[in-house]
Image: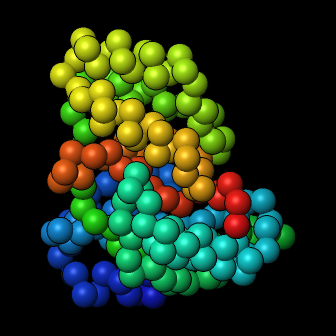
Amino acid sequence: MSPETLLPLKQHPNAPVLGKGADGTVYDLGDNVLKISTFLNYERLDIKKVAKEKINNLKKIQKLKLDHLVELFDIGEIQQFSKIQSQDDYLDIFIYSYKMKKLTSVSEDEKKILELISHKDFDKPIVITQKTYESAKELCSFYDVDLKKVNWFFKSIEKSPVRHLDVHTRNIMSATDGSFKLIDLDRITFTHS
C-alpha cells in the first residue's frame, strides 16, 4: 500500500487485520472496524462516476439506518489512480474506506440456517420464498436458533430498499442484542431512489 492509502490507518497504526476479501481489508479498532476497499475498474467504467456512486451509496445506507445492516460512519474516498498494466493498457483503481460497528460471528447452528439465503450467484439480489421460511422453521426446531430472529432478518431483507449483492454466511454477523446484520456493503443497489 502506498502512504496515501494508509491515511485512515494513521490514527490506528497498530490495528490488527481482522480479515481480507475480494473488495478489501478489515482492521480491528476495538469497538469498531475499519474497512479499506478497492475497486478495480476492469470494465472501463467512468471511474469518477463509480467513485461518487460508491461513496454516495454508503452515505445513503448510513442515513437510512436499516436494522439489518451494520452501522456505518467515517465514509471517505482515499485515492483514485491508474496503474499501467502494459505498454498499451492501464487499470483505473479507486480506494475508499468506512468504519463499521464491530460485530461477532454467528454460531455454527445459525450459519446452517442462514445458508438458506446465501447464494453463489455473485452480484444478484437474493429472493426469499415461502419455502425458505418453511425450511428455516424446520431447521430452527432442530438447531439451537431463534426462529423469530431468523424470520425478522429475512423479512427485513425482503422489505429493504437496499439489495445486497454478496449475501453469504461470512457477510452475516451478530450484534450485541443477537440480531443479524449484513456487512461488506461494497456491492449494493437500491430498489428505488
- Residue 110 location in percent, x, y? 28, 29
Q: Nearer the viewer, residue 32 or 86?
A: 32
On screen, residue 44 above or below 109: below
In the image, is 128 to the left or to the right of 101? Answer: right
- Residue 48 location in percent, x, y? 72, 81
On screen, residue 98 above or below 124: below
Query: Could you tell me which quadrant the C terminus lies in?
Result: bottom right
Whether residue 161 is visible here, answered yes or no, is yes
In the image, is 172 to the left or to the right of 168? Answer: left
Q: Residue at x 66, y 41 (%)?
A: 124
Q: Residue at x 22, y 81 (%)?
A: 12
In the image, is 105 to the left or to the right of 38? Answer: left
Q: Nearer the viewer, residue 140 or 70?
A: 140
Examine the image and state in which quarter residue 121 appears: top right
Q: Residue furthest right?
A: 88
For the rendered model, the colour scheme is rainbow
Whether residue 27 is visible here, answered yes or no, is no
Q: Residue at x 57, y 76 (%)?
A: 55
Query: Could you tell me which quadrant the N terminus lies in?
Result: bottom left
- Residue 138 location in percent, x, y? 35, 12
Examine the image and state in which quarter residue 150 appears: top left
- Residue 162 location in percent, x, y? 58, 55
On screen, residue 34 above or below 113: below
Q: Nearer the viewer, residue 47 or 65?
A: 65
Q: How many marks?
A: 0
